[in-house]
Amino acid sequence: MKVKDILAVKGSQVRTVHEDISVIDAMSIFSANRVGSLLVVDKNDSILGIIAARDVLMAVLNDLDRITELPVKEIMTRELIVATENDDVDYVQAIMTENRIRHIPVIEGSDLKGLISIGDVVKAQLKKKDVENKYLKDYIADKYPG
């Protein structure tokens, strides 16, 4: 299974925020859209980084005094780990696990194709296993002619 298979089901919509938005405003976007991460972009919509719930938690713990005016650009992760549409889901899961990240942007060339979460990866793998399991049970039960 490939990343593009996940995006075909999930869709390619990605929530983004401008680098100068406050962390508090970003938290509102997290909540309103029920997402766990937001891509951070500049005025030209070029991707600069990503902000996740853990980044917000650390900002609250480390900079509570300034949290109302603290801009996202001060707490975002700048070194992005990305996937491509043709990456194997098992490979992406290994990358996410190794780097302890829960969200990964999907990029082809300079185009943003989507964003997948570890939950999307697990859901896709469970579906694949369910299908394989059904075929094996049907085979064992001799439901196939021949």
Image (spheres, helix red, strand yellow):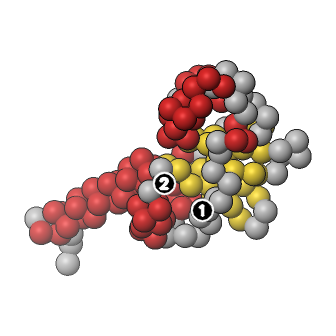
Find residue 72 and report its image quarter: top right
Asked if residue 5 lies left or right of residue 17, the reply is left
Single out the residue that lies furthest toward the bottom. 146
Closer to us: 77 or 74: 74
Disc 2: which residue? 101
Q: Which mark is residue 81?
A: 1
**Secondary structure of residue under mark 2:** loop
Residue at 54% x, 45% y: name it: 10
How many numbered discs, if any? 2
Residue 33 in view of the camera: no
Single out the residue that lies furthest toward the right. 44
Position of residue 117 measured from the top left corner of the image (x, y, whole percent): 49, 49
**Type of residue at label 1?**
Ile
Residue at 41% x, 61% y: name it: 97
Residue 51 in view of the camera: yes
Asked if residue 133 lies left or right of residue 110, the reply is left
**Secondary structure of residue under mark 1:** loop
**Type of residue at label 2?**
Ile
Tell me: residue 121, above or below residue 34: below
Tell me: residue 71, above or below residue 122: above
Split into 4 quadrants, where in the image is the C terminus?
bottom left
Residue at 38% x, 50% y: name it: 123
